[in-house]
């Protein structure tokens, strides 16, 4: 896996200017076009949605500089959930933003205040070398800088209203942010993973990141239905970039949640269950990519899927143990 994981430490940020004063920042975590953070601007104020990991913070700050946004004008860091590719940089980032507060789900707040269990959990699974090389560090956040993001709560950014929605399924500590201005959902992982390399004339290919340890397929599908009741135009995906999110998108994601679950259930009694799940997930993803008309050759597809296979298989295994 070492040849796959890269991190660019230069200070030249890669970002995509979208409509409605939203910027998609490539955190360059693991590879390019893999993990995004978002910057929202309105009325001279700004907010980040998710941060990437600790090593991503220079790219976020460099984006502010490139866009001539003063650090004191950043009001909020809005975290969809506390998985480290989304929130691992929050403690470092807020040190550079003197007027910012952090919004996070109540189930995630204590891990930001004291990240020792998060750190120990990651090191326990991946080792200290991986943690230092690819995640960097976890900096605690003072409790007085954290505000609990409750379902239905609204905040104002300039003239813009942003609304928090409790969105369990991927994780119990997950919220999405509804932006009425763009009719977009800053969706973290709730509306799936969709890499631009897999786009075809059929649209986007979307599948679920079944990360451990709180994957709940039925709850997740209920959450998708709830979000679709808002009639969104866009989903701002962490993995990766903004897409138009239609009823077809929602149905594809729900169908692939079911597909992943069936793979896990069929592998439950295998002697090496984790390996079996991982192999069948790869076959499944290659099959749906073929059906979607993806032009990449199989080796390229495997390289792009590789970062998700291990963690998705782990999450499905945890779900089986809990079921």
Image: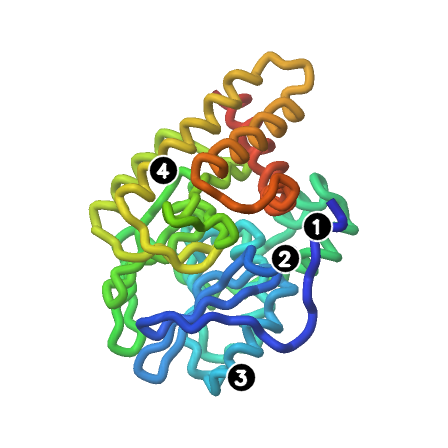
Residue drawn at the location 63% of the way across and 14% of the way down: 270
Residue 115: image x %, image y %? Answer: 61, 53
Q: Could one spot residue 173 in this view of the protein?
A: no
Q: How far separated are the C-alphas under marks 4 and 3?
A: 39 Å
Can you identify the residue that label 1 sits on?
A: 4
Q: Which of marks 3 and 1 is in front?
A: 1
> On screen, 49 above or below 298?
below
Say which element carries label 3. helix
Can you identify the residue that label 4 sits on?
A: 252
Can you identify the residue that label 2 sits on?
A: 31
* Disc 4 residue crowd, few under 14, some 14–19, many 20+, Cα 10 Å: some
- The image quadrant that residue 293 belongs to is top left
Q: How far separated are the C-alphas under marks 1 and 2?
A: 8 Å
Q: How far separated are the C-alphas under marks 2 and 3?
A: 23 Å
N-term mark: 1 or 2: 1
Can you identify the residue that label 3 sits on?
A: 65
Asked if the residue at tag 2 contacts the one at tag 1, i.e. Cβ–Cβ closer than 8 Å, the answer is yes
* Disc 1 residue crowd, few under 14, some 14–19, many 20+, Cα 10 Å: few
- The image quadrant that residue 237 belongs to is bottom left
N-term mark: 1 or 4: 1
Asked if the residue at tag 4 contacts the one at tag 1, i.e. Cβ–Cβ closer than 8 Å, the answer is no
N-term mark: 4 or 3: 3
Asked if the residue at tag 4 contacts the one at tag 2, i.e. Cβ–Cβ closer than 8 Å, the answer is no
> On screen, 51 above or below 292?
below
Q: How far separated are the C-alphas under marks 2 and 4?
A: 25 Å
* Disc 2 residue crowd, few under 14, some 14–19, many 20+, Cα 10 Å: some
């Amino acid at each position: 896996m070492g040849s796959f994981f890269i991190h660019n430490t230069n200070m030249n940020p890669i970002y995509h200017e979208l409509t409605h004063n939203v910027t998609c920042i490539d955190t360059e975590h693991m590879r390019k076009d893999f993990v995004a953070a978002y910057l929202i601007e309105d009325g001279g104020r700004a907010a980040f949605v998710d941060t990437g990991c600790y090593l991503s913070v220079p790219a976020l700050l460099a984006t502010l500089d490139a866009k001539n946004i003063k650090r004191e004008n950043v009001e909020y860091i809005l975290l969809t959930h506390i998985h480290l590719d989304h929130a691992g940089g929050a403690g470092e980032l807020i040190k550079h933003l003197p007027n910012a507060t952090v919004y996070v789900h109540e189930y995630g707040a204590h891990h930001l205040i004291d990240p020792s269990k998060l750190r120990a959990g990651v090191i326990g699974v991946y080792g200290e070398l991986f943690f230092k090389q690819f995640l960097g560090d976890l900096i605690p956040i003072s409790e007085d800088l954290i505000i609990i993001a409750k379902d239905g709560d609204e905040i104002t950014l300039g003239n813009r209203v942003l609304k928090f929605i409790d969105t369990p399924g991927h994780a119990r500590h997950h919220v999405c942010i509804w932006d009425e201005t763009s009719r977009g959902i800053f969706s973290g992982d709730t509306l799936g993973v969709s890499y631009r390399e897999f786009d075809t004339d059929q649209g986007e290919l979307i599948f679920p990141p079944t990360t451990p340890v709180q994957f709940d397929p039925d709850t997740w599908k209920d959450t998708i239905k709830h979000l679709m009741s808002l009639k969104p135009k866009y989903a701002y995906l962490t993995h990766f970039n903004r897409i138009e999110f239609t009823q077809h998108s929602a149905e594809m994601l729900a169908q692939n949640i079911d597909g992943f679950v069936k793979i896990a259930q069929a592998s439950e009694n295998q002697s090496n269950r984790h390996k079996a799940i991982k192999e069948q997930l790869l076959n499944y993803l290659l099959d749906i990519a073929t059906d979607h008309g993806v032009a990449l050759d199989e080796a390229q597809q495997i390289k792009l899927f590789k970062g998700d296979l291990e963690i998705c298989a782990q999450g499905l295994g945890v779900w089986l143990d809990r079921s």
